[in-house]
Image (cartoon, rainbow, N blue to C red):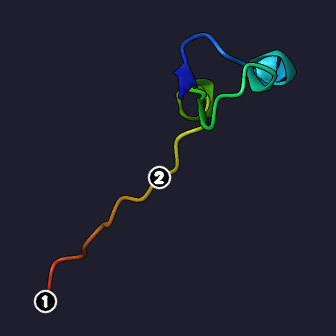
Amino acid sequence: EASGGIGPEDLPEVAATGVDYVAMGMLTHSAPAADLSLKLAPVP
């Protein structure tokens, strides 16, 4: 596995080393947040 500071532009060079897996934190660090809140109304 290769990880740390790897972006999409680095994939060809990293793949050439023969690693089986590449971890890219930028996929989750830069993803926009989704509002999954559950708002309940009081029961009358």
- Tell me the residue at 47%/52% (across/down): 35
Do tag 2 and tag 1 residues touch (Cβ < 8 Å)? no
**Residue 10 image position (x, y, % from top left):** 80, 16
The amino acid type, in three-letter code, at marker 2 is: Asp
Residue 8 numbered tag: none
Number of numbered labels in the structure image: 2
Question: In the rendered image of this protein, does residue 28 appear above or below residue 2?
Answer: below
Question: In the rendered image of this protein, does residue 40 appear above or below residue 30?
Answer: below
**Could you tell me which secondary element the residue under label 1 belongs to?**
loop
Q: Quadrant of the C terminus?
A: bottom left
- Tell me the residue at 24%/76% (across/down): 41
Crowding at dot 1, Cα within 10 Å, few <14 / some 14-19 / many 20+, comes out as: few
Q: Dot 1 corresponds to which residue?
A: 44
Q: Is residue 6 left or right of residue 3?
A: right
Dividing the picture into quarters, in which one does residue 22 lie? top right
- Tell me the residue at 79%/24% (across/down): 11
**Could you tell me which secondary element the residue under label 2 belongs to?**
loop
Crowding at dot 2, Cα within 10 Å, few <14 / some 14-19 / many 20+, comes out as: few
- Tell me the residue at 14%/86% (across/down): 43
**Residue 4 image position (x, y, % from top left):** 54, 13
Q: CA distance from mark 2 to mark 1?
A: 27 Å
Residue 35 numbered tag: 2
Query: Seen from this angle, which residue lies furthest top?
Result: 5
Observer-nearest residue: 13 or 29? 13
**Residue 21 image position (x, y, % from top left):** 60, 36
Observer-nearest residue: 9 or 27? 9
Query: Seen from this angle, which residue lies furthest front?
Result: 18
Question: In the rendered image of this protein, does residue 23 appear above or below residue 34?
Answer: above
The amino acid type, in three-letter code, at marker 1 is: Pro
Depth check, mark 2 against mark 1: the one in front is 2
Precedes in sequence: disc 2 or disc 1: 2
Q: Is residue 2 left or right of residue 15?
A: left
